[in-house]
Amino acid sequence: MQRFELFYILLLALIPVLLPAQGAVDFHFQKGNALYLEEQYPEAIQEYEAVLHNGLESAELYYNLGNSYYKAGRLGKAILNYERALKLRPKDDNIRFNLQLSNLRVKDRIDVPPDFFLLRWNRNMVQTLTVRGWARLFTLLLLMTSGVFAIRQMLNLNRFRRLCRSGLLALAIATFLTLLPLLQRYGMEHSRAYGIILQSSTKSLAAPQEGSTELFIVHEGTRVQVLDYDGDWSKTKLIDGKQAWVRSRDLEII
């Protein structure tokens, strides 16, 4: 009995640790929404950031945070949070629209040749779901394939066995075709690091050291791929393929 009471006391003591103060998180989020409606954007940003500091994130939170930064005139932070929201909810038209609107204000206009239409179609298709979404679809198809295979093994009637064989083949192909975009989406989100330039302008240098040859200037809101790190420097790549080193403090990873 004493052991049970001790366990119960310890459980009560751990509840605040195991379950973060959801009430406080909701309070900060709702207060941020109210401050945004009152056009008090810096204060709204503080409330939304408080939610993130509690270790919680959502597409809606990043979207609201992006809107607040946009209204506050901080373009880089706005684009950064829209990009983070889009990673969690890739099919959201409102997020896409606001991100496109923000990108129109970026000073850097990088012209790239248009993609081959099949590559563009494949990229758009892969981005319709998150890694979790593709994984769920793959798991569902895999379970269905296993179920049909088990039914085919149990049935003795030739007619049903042929029907199951056709269904099994179709499901196996669909499962394999789902695996491909799952791997691609995972690579897009985890194998490559992308960041947003947060400074109004930053020098892009040929080497990771002060005094190195300046190659070009990138401005706030520009999206870059981070290829490597060297101390306080990040090797970046623009969408047109240009590579250079910038100060790591001048950008933030999406």
Image (cartoon, grey):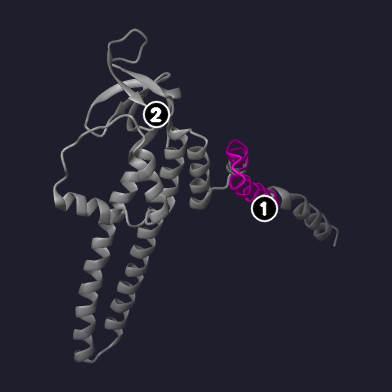
Q: Residue at x 79, y 58 (%)?
A: 8
Question: In the image, residue 28 lies at what x, y percent?
Answer: 65, 46
Amino acid marked by disc 2: Glu
Q: Which residues are magenta?
A: 23-47
Q: Is residue 8 above or below residue 204?
A: below
Sequence-wise first label, 1 or 2: 1
Q: Residue at x 36, y 12 (%)?
A: 209
In which quadrant is the C terminus drawn?
A: top left
Residue at the front extreme? 38
> Few, some or many C-alpha atoms within 10 Å of disc 2 (few <14, some 14-19, many ≥20)?
many
Residue 68 shows up from this direction:
yes
Question: In the image, residue 238 lies at what x, y percent?
Answer: 27, 31
Amino acid marked by disc 1: Gln
Question: In the image, residue 42 lies at what x, y percent?
Answer: 59, 36
Residue at the top extreme? 211
Q: Is residue 254 left or right of residue 111?
A: right
In which quadrant is the N terminus drawn?
A: bottom right
Question: Which label number is shown at residue 220?
Answer: 2
Instruction: Give the camera-side residue of 222 and 90.
Output: 222
Q: Determine which residue is flagged by label 1.
A: 22
Instruction: Give the camera-side residue of 152 and 103.
Output: 103
Q: Is residue 204 above or below residue 22?
A: above
- Overall secondary structure of the magenta section: helix
